[in-house]
Image: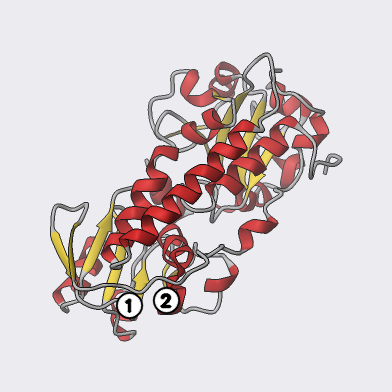
Amino acid sequence: MSLAVLLAGATGCGGSPKAAAQAPAAAAADRVEPLKDTPVPRLPVTVDSADGRKVTVREARRIVPLSGSLSEIVFTLGLGERVVARDITATFQQAAKLPVVTRNHDVSAESVLSLKPDLVIAETTSGPAEAVDQIRAAGVPVLVVAPAKGLSDVGPRIETVARALGVPGAGKELARRSQARIAAVRKEIPAHQDKPRVAFLYLRGSASVYLIGGRNSGATSLLEAAGAVDAGAASGLTKDFTAITAEALAKAAPDAILVMTKGLESVGGVDGLVKIPGVAETPAGMHRRVVSVEDGVLLNYGPRTDQVLATVVRQLYGGGDGGGDK
């Protein structure tokens, strides 16, 4: 079960235990940082789509990205003024006033088409398929982009979108900038003898959804970049997500827990999190070591991934924005 589908429904650590029990230090994630020079699209172009099609883009004056991650890329390339709608997960300030036409991969073809787009950019998980087909049948080019699974996808996704928008040079520049910033964060990770084990938990208290991420949750690459071990994957969980049990948590034995901010809020914060069966008995639960990152940016693997990584590192190893238990 992928994170996209979930969103549609709903002792190795350094630093003090209290430092990691705080809300995310992600204020910078409220805005994207466009390239200094606004590129001018050179169209038409024909590009390969992840669904096996060839897509010809003749205009890019009215763009509809069907995910927050794709919106982030378009805006950061400097073409945000051409975006006419957003997915509900596009939470950064520059996109906040745009009309919402998708809600966590639930696409409204009528809403999209009413805005007269000349290009729709979708994820492989965008759907329902009937809605995407309806948009395509109306004559609107639909570019499907391969999913982001880790840090190695940052550059390719940016360059794929940039090529479709007729700004390949800007794509290469942004990819280089993003990768350089990620490398700079990794250089500053505090030296630590043991790699902390971190479990990624997907929580939606209102829907009684409590899951632990496995090998394909999308968090492994981020945690490894932070100098940690994905506790779920290391414990043998091969699915994307598995229902949380006391046994699964005991086997994962996380030193810290990674969660999305709204997920943490949905269970009543750290106090509520440790009441989930099995959590309080883990090293993470006993020491209340919780790393919380904004939902809309955590696993985007895009231009702001360096900020996400820095936030994880800061909370995991202490310092910066830490504080007392909530």
Residue underneath mark 1: 112
The residue under the point 50% across, 64% down is 35
The residue under the point 47% across, 67% down is 75
Quadrant in which the N terminus appears:
top left
Q: x, y (%) of residue 153?
A: 38, 43
Corner quadrant of residue 245: top right
Residue underneath mark 2: 85
Tell which of 289 and 85 is nearer to you: 85
Q: Is any atom of residue 248 visible in this view?
A: yes
The reply to whether callout 2 and callout 1 are in contact (CB within 8 Å) is yes
Tell which of 199 and 304 is nearer to you: 304
Count of numbered tags: 2
Instruction: Indicate the amino acid at tag 2.
Output: Ala
Q: x, y (%) of residue 308?
A: 59, 46
Q: Residue furthest top?
A: 193
- Which is nearer the N-term, disc 2 or disc 1? 2
Q: x, y (%) of residue 115?
A: 34, 84
From the viewer's perspective, tell me whether residue 202 is left or right of residue 52.
Answer: right
Tell which of 28 and 292 is nearer to you: 28
